[in-house]
């Protein structure tokens, strides 16, 4: 049975309302978590107005809540952007997160590779099967070409996700270096 235009519109409105409710739920959860974090580091006294020392004296609970709310809105906007991003971009960001947290390839570690090694590693993972076969045909191997990087190919898509994450790491490294140099 085909849906009428009104049924389709009603269904879309329900989905939008559900999404708005989910966003509000996540915002409330994040807001509560942030307030708990503030309490754990001892700022709850200042938020309640009973603090007597430090830079926080002039902050009222209302001002802190406004700051927390702005942060929640910003995080929510970023999360929504990521939710609406393609699966490929989410996978690249997820891989970059994994590289940092599971492999220990932190920004500090990446900053030690100012010689283009991150971009080279990305290029290796981005090589096509044809290019790899040409290297092998000529008697070479990827591991010999780039011995400083542990080359562990998986499947084509996974390798491209790794390449994307490594390119992201290199761009972030360049941005940090430029900021540090004042440019």
Image (cartoon, rainbow, N blue to C red):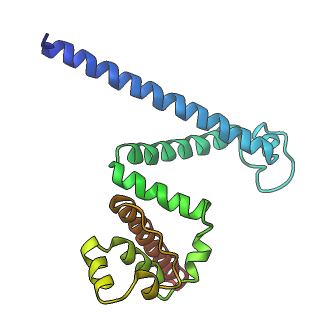
Q: Is residue 130 left or right of residue 3?
A: right
Residue sitting at 45 percent across and 75 percent down? Answer: 170
Along the viewing direction, whichever of 173 and 131 lies nearer the viewer: 131
Along the viewing direction, whichever of 63 and 24 lies nearer the viewer: 24
- Residue situated furthest top in the rendering: 1
Does residue 93 lie above or below 26 as drawn? below
Along the viewing direction, whichever of 171 and 95 lies nearer the viewer: 95
Does residue 69 lie above or below 1 as drawn? below
In the figure, residue 11 lies in which quadrant? Answer: top left
Q: Is residue 47 left or right of residue 33?
A: right
Image coords of residue 97 (percent x, y)? 53, 58
Quadrant including the N terminus: top left
Q: Is residue 71 visible?
A: yes
Image coords of residue 139 (percent x, y)? 34, 89
Q: Is residue 176 left or right of residue 161?
A: right
Q: Is residue 24 left or right of residue 28?
A: left
Q: How many marks?
A: 0
Image coords of residue 182 (percent x, y)? 51, 83
Residue sitting at 61 percent across and 43 percent down? Answer: 68
Does residue 88 lie above or below 173 as drawn? above
Residue sitting at 25 percent across and 15 percent down? Answer: 10
Q: Is residue 183 visible?
A: no
Along the viewing direction, whichever of 138 and 175 lies nearer the viewer: 138
Residue sitting at 46 percent across and 45 percent down? Answer: 79
């Amino acid at each position: 049975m085909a849906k009428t235009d009104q049924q389709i519109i009603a269904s879309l409105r329900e989905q939008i309302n559900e999404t708005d409710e989910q966003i509000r739920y996540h915002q409330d959860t994040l807001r509560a978590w942030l307030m708990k974090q503030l309490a754990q580091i001892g700022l709850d006294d200042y938020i309640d107005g009973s603090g007597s020392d430090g830079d926080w004296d002039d902050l009222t609970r209302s001002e802190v809540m406004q700051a927390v709310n702005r942060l929640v809105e910003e995080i929510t906007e970023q999360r929504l952007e990521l939710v609406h991003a393609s699966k490929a971009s989410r996978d690249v960001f997820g891989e970059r997160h994994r590289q940092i947290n599971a492999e220990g390839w932190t920004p500090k570690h990446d900053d030690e590779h100012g010689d283009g090694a991150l971009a080279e590693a990305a290029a290796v993972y981005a090589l096509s099967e044809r290019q790899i076969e040409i290297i092998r045909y000529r008697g070479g191997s990827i591991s010999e070409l780039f011995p400083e990087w542990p080359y562990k190919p998986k499947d084509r898509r996974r390798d491209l996700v790794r390449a994307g994450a490594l390119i992201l790491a290199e761009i972030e490294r360049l941005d940090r270096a430029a900021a540090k140099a004042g440019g």
